Amino acid sequence: MIVIRRRSVELYAMERLLVLLPASHEKRKEVGDAVYRLKAGRAGEREVDKYVRLTRIPGPAKVLTDLELEIGPNHIVQIDTVILTPRGAWILEAKRYKGTLRYLKNPNRLERIDSNEEVTPFPCPISQLSTQIRALEHWLADRGITLPVQGKIAFVSNNLWQGLPSDAPIIPVRDVPFYLQQSFDHLPEVLDLPLFHQLAEQLAKEKHRFNPFPLCARFGINPNTLKRGFLCPTCHARMRFITERTCRCEACNFQTLPDYGRALLDWFLLIHPTINNQQLRLFLGLKNKYAATRILALFELLKVGTSRNTAYTIDPFVGLENMQLKRRMKAGEGSGR
Ligand SMILES: [Zn+2]
């Protein structure tokens, strides 16, 4: 099966936030921990992807990644992986924990005991999976479709378990192909091909319902406490202009063209969804409004407001290419040569 999982804009933004937070900032630990968790989560998902790619089933199948289904006002259910076929849908939830895991009831929860006997509680992955299954069932029912929805929690790590119910929907990640193939074989065909393709297309659009940006607001960080200006790509210290177009890092002497796109994107993802000429000037320490105008004109930005109130914005989920702002084509570019 073909699996396409795009880089996470959220993870990119969190890593940038870490770059822009000064070393002594009080939120560094919290953001650092969040980056670590998100990275571990993505690594788990990519491991599951590897095994989904090894899965062969007869007939069409569509793998949908990073879905966000809205099941009620302000209630969004995130699903890492859905495999949609004309016979049924499968949800896979990747989990990767270090240490011994203890399953506890009333309320259902999971505890990890690491090598130092330290106990960390986690939300119950089994309840999480049933919520995801119900969300997808509702989504299908809303479209008049009855299709079996099943799922498993795929453990990427090898753990010692305590108190795990024998019918727990948990499998080691390497069993994913066998699980999918076998449960597929036991189901009859429900959807005809046109309906299957139509559903796959609709489901693929269930993304980005939750917008985590700007991250400063989410983490309760005052944007004025972030580093300003152009930051060195190697050591992240502030750079100074030594000519009109070249900056040098005061800490490591690295010299480069200033990366305007990176800085603008930092603003949109971390500080505020829109930027105007004056805000850009202050953020980057530019000498006048013409310099800011020139920079803003380099990129494909959406204009909001008029004349004196003009500001610019982007859609962080569709406006980026390879985690960079799309550049505006200059006259003559892209005309064949
Ligand atoms: Zn440097």
Image (tube, grey):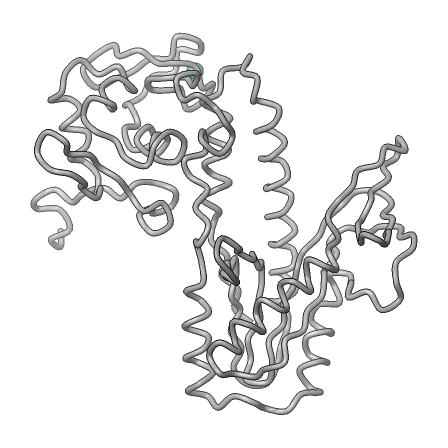
Residue closest to the eye, 44 or 273: 273
Q: Quadrant of ligand 1?
A: top left
Which residue is depicted at the point 26% across and 39% down? Answer: 313
Tell me: 276 left or right of 155. Answer: left
* Figure check: 22 above or below 67: above
Residue plotted at (51% across, 71% down):
139
Find residue 240 and report its image quarter. Answer: top left
Which residue is more in the foreground, 218 or 200? 218
Q: Is residue 326 above or below residue 204?
A: above
Q: How many marks?
A: 0
Q: Is residue 145 left or right of residue 331?
A: right
Quarter of the figure with the N terminus: bottom right
Expressed as whole percent of the image width and height from the top left, the position of residue 127 reads 72, 59
Q: Give the quarter of the image for residue 310.
A: top left
In the image, farthest residue toward the front: 73
Q: Residue at x 86, y 51 (%)?
A: 104
Q: Nearer the viewer, residue 185 or 246?
A: 185
Q: Position of residue 308 (x, y in %)?
A: 10, 29
x and y percent of residue 285 in the render?
Answer: 26, 14
Where residue 89 sits: x, y (%)? 60, 75
Can you say whether 241 is above or below 129 in the image? above
User: Which residue shows up at 87% across the image and 45% down it?
Assistant: 100
Compared with 227, 320 (above or below) is below
Relative to 209, 152 lies left or right: right
